Image (spheres, rainbow, N blue to C red):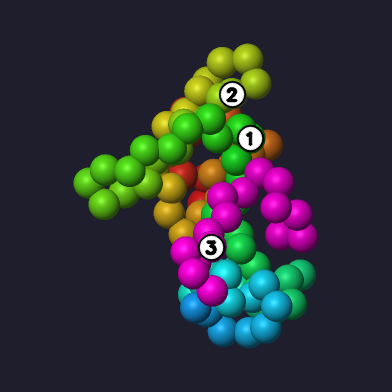
Amino acid sequence: LNSYEGKVLRFNLESTGSGTGLDPWIPDDNPYNNVAPVTGKSAVWNIGHRNIHGFAFGNNRLYGSSHGQFSDDEVNVLEANRNYGHPRIQGFADGNYN
């Protein structure tokens, strides 16, 4: 959680959140705010992505397509506070890595 690599980040469209500096741009209800090792706000919304290549929004859901290393591309329903498994899971598994 100390790095923004391999994660989906979520920001406010306007600086309407709490805090000072850049914190108002990070939603107050992001799932990794004040979760160890993070102290304070975190833009992380979910984790465990190798390489999200595209997003789509439909049916009130956010989808992300990810490329596997050699095969096993994925389409995931992206939700808050989820771990999508990279580097341990790639391609089909028995559902979400959680």
* Disc with the residue nearer the chain's start (2 vs 3): 3
Asked whether residue 74 is drawn in magenta, I would say no
- The outermost residue toward the bottom is 19
**The disc label shown at residue 68, or none:** 2
Other-residue count near label 3 (Cα within 10 Å), few / some / many at <14 / 14–19 / ≥20: some
Quick check: marks 2 and 3 in contact, CB under 8 Å?
Answer: no
Residue type (three-letter) at the residue carrying disc 1: Arg
What residue lies at 53% left-to-right and 30% top-to-bottom? 53
Above-or-below relation of 77 to 28: above
Quick check: marks 2 and 1 in contact, CB under 8 Å?
Answer: yes
Residue type (three-letter) at the residue carrying disc 3: Phe
Quick check: can you spot residue 91? no
Residue matched to label 1: 50
Residue type (three-letter) at the residue carrying disc 2: Gly
Quick check: can you spot residue 20? yes
Q: What secondary structure is found at the residue carrying circle 1? A: loop
Q: What secondary structure is found at the residue carrying circle 3? A: loop
Please give the range of residues in magenta: 1-15
* Disc with the residue nearer the chain's start (2 vs 1): 1
Residue 42 picture location, percent across and down: 65, 68
Is 60 displayed left or right of 64 in the figure?
left
Q: CA distance from mark 1 to mark 3?
A: 21 Å
Q: Report the front residue among 42 and 31.
A: 42
